[in-house]
Amino acid sequence: MGAMLLLSGTTGSMAVENQPDSLYLFSYTTPKDENKTGLHFAWSVDGKRWIRIGNEYAFVKSDYGAWGAGKRMYDPVLQRTRNGMWLCSFLVKNGGDVVGQTESRDLILWKPQDYMSVNAKTGPNRNVKRDQITFSDGERATGQIHRVERDVVNKLKAEYERKQYLNGLYAEQMKDDGARFANLKGVTMTVTADPSGKKAISPELFGVFFEDINYAADGGLYGELVQNRDFEYSEKELSHKPGWGHTYAWSTPNGGRLTIRQDNPIHKNNAFHAVFDTDGGTASLVNSCYDGIPVKKGNKYVFSLFGKVLAGDNTRVKVSLRTKTGKDIAAGVVSLSKTDWKRRTITITAIETAADAVLTLTPADKGSYAFDMVSLFPKNTFKGRENGLRADIAQAIADLKPRFVRFPGGCVAHGNGIENIYRWKNTVGPLEQRVGMRNIWGYRQSMGLGYYEYFTFCEDLGAEPLPVLAAGVPCQNSSIGGDGQQGGIPLGKEMDEYIQDVLDLIEWANGDKNTKWGKVRAEAGHPKPFNLKYIGIGNEDLISDVFKERFELIYKAVKEKHPEIEVIGTVGPFYEGSDYEYGWQFAGDLKVPIVDEHYYCSPGWFIHNPNFYDDYDRTKSKVYLGEYASHLPGRPNNMETALSIANYLTNVERNADVVKLSSYAPLMARKGNTQWTPDMMYFDNEKVNLTTDYYVQRMFGQNAGSAYIPATVSTNNPTEAVNLRVGQSIVIDEKSGDVIVKLTNLLPTEVKTKLSLGSLVSGTKKSKLEVLQGQPADRTATPVKSEISVSADTEYTMPAYSLSVIRISKK
Ligand code: AHR
């Protein structure tokens, strides 16, 4: 808990009480929506007739606790200090003993909140005088009356009006384009490149955000086909999930008894194992995998397990992939040890194709058999790696041509409660020794896809690894651990150990194979260093005192020991507001090289903010736009979401001297196990469905540049709505020398584009053209490739609702 200035006694409004130009301001909350609607204001000239500002607009909301259950504000006390600051404290539970506190100079921008436990009976919010007012519609409210300068009220009203105006713009949707652009035709855009203004931009601008959300790791990218292979799923971890527990996904349909035991585990980190007792015959232990396994005739599968025979003479266990009709279409036999846990591996080949087979283990005779780490991988993993990745999903990621991969989240990185903070050391080393755990998204992560696999995947992709580690605080929306984010790893020994973990990661990734952690990496099969450049510390955290003191400790330790590493800080979950403002200030004070911005916004927001980065101070921290996506009501991926992002990305490219890295989020989801939409791709067991948002990312990723060419752009239509909906960006990929022109048209009509590329093109070049086009609600549009002749002056007609990429080869 950070230090807090507690409030008590009367509200401070003495200074303005006798000024002629003052008004009454009433601060209050309502019990509506379980007190989640935040702090409201009303004003009055005479203290009798009250007018609400913005009909209960929330000027600040509680940020305490989990979404749904938390974020409540009770009994707020607002007090003005002598230096003109407004302090607001409130209870986070009705009659509870945790007080939240924040402060503001103007009642509009509030500081990130801090929280502390107080005595529930005598706490500061108990003995403050409350006022009651009645609005002209008869509604009564309890709060505090303050006397303030008229300007205070005017600014609150203006802020509300501003927000209303912006909300109107941001709510614009393409479904209204018919009315918005009735009779629109004949739009021409002229783009005149200025090669002399060429500037360097980040060659690493486009990367991917990988989070173990939506079963993206286990049951997704991670090639393991067996679910709950280690019998570690536990009802204690996820009590709300029916049937969730050590036997989840396992069954004994043909007889036999399955028991879960803890005696003599294969490793202390792998506490549970299965014992299967059989009287022989066809009794088998079956794993349903992740909704079955699609088996293809001729495909090979690598099966392994730890096993031993506890009782019985026959050590042989048949391993098979069985169809729904009971036919074994791939099979082999392993022979177990009678004395000790031993690992056995065989490769089996499918002799038939089946949509959803299951894995069966059938002991050859009666007896008692212990099993653990029962595993099945397709032989054909991405790049053929052992413990590898599902090839088609990994390939879809590779096709994006990501320059970096961020992992393991998102919220997975900071976790649901302190105990759930993702610890990289739990995810390396032999699989049976890794420490799996519940996932903030409501399932279990085996850590089979751990740091070693993330790093080697990056290597296979030619992408920079970008691990994000918690800043010593869990997610501010945690539902576990009482105070959620408002707790942090205790300072002292525990925090020191945590900081050491961060330093050890750098040694593990980059250290010589003779260093303590470099040796661990080398033993895993990678003697050469990984050349880690970036480390993210924190994930869209509340910029509370608890966060700040921990971040600073980690940051300074990394800077001191590894000045070569670029630390990426965090500035909260939104593009504005308290965490964003104070996060930037904090990063500036510490001179953090890069900060991670997140914003999930409407298409209207992306359309109406083309200049978001134009005024960013180039001398301050650079930006990693680490999570963003365009969200429509119902959260689909369609041409509207895709084009709003494409148009925005042309502006990001223009600003890629300040935006170094960017990644759309989340990357993917398993159909039927999706906690968050939209995602860039959706997969089931058989295929990966690519969305329109994916195609935009691929078109930008495959056509990134290292230099930006400014251009003068004009249209023959003076309307702002039209001009906001056409975009362009010209970059040069200096390695190949190719010039790449990206053009966006978010209008319902085609747009003739006059391209003047000057010295960028000599002669006439047969060039590549790729166009993604479709009506706004179209979810299935795919890009079409063709050729186009380009010279210094070229006319190109952008189809309605389209992204076009023209790649002009140097040769
Ligand atoms: O991308 C999904 C989630 O959105 C991430 O886990 C979190 O960082 C953000 O709130």
Image: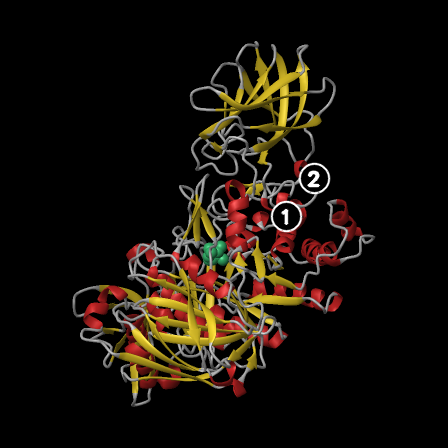
393, above or below 53, in the image:
above
The amino acid pointed to by label 2 is Pro
Q: Is residue 224 left or right of residue 98?
A: right
Q: Quadrant of residue 623?
A: bottom right
Crowd tier of the residue under label 2, counting other residues whose Cα lies within 10 Å: few below 14, some 14–19, many 20 or above: few
Please give the name of the residue rendered at 39% of the width and 85% of the height, measured from the top-left corner.
15
For mark 1, what is the residue?
453
**Residue 520 percent location from the top left of the image:** 76, 47
On-image quarter of the C terminus: bottom right
Of residue 38 and residue 276, the one placed in the foreground of this image is 276
Q: Name the mark on residue 430.
A: 2
On-image quarter of the N terminus: bottom right
The amino acid pointed to by label 1 is Glu
Please give the name of the residue rendered at 32% of the width and 60% of the height, measured from the top-left corner.
632
Q: Name the mark on residue 480.
A: none
How is the model colour-coded? Answer: secondary structure
Mark 1 or 2: the one toward you? 1
Query: Can the viewer see residue 98 in this picture?
Result: no
Q: Which numbered disc flags the more N-terminal residue, 1 or 2? A: 2
Crowd tier of the residue under label 1, counting other residues whose Cα lies within 10 Å: few below 14, some 14–19, many 20 or above: many
**Residue 544 percent location from the top left of the image:** 53, 65
For the residues labelled 1 and 2, say whether their Cβ atoms are less than 8 Å apart.
no
Q: Is residue 509 left or right of residue 393?
A: right
Of residue 530 and residue 275, the one placed in the foreground of this image is 530
Asked if the beta carbon under badge 1 is closer than 8 A to the nearest atom of ligand 1, the reply is no
Element carrying mark 2: loop
769, above or below 370, in the image:
below
**Residue 160 percent location from the top left of the image:** 31, 75
In space, the residues marked 1 and 2 are separated at their CA atoms by 12 Å
**Residue 143 percent location from the top left of the image:** 32, 67
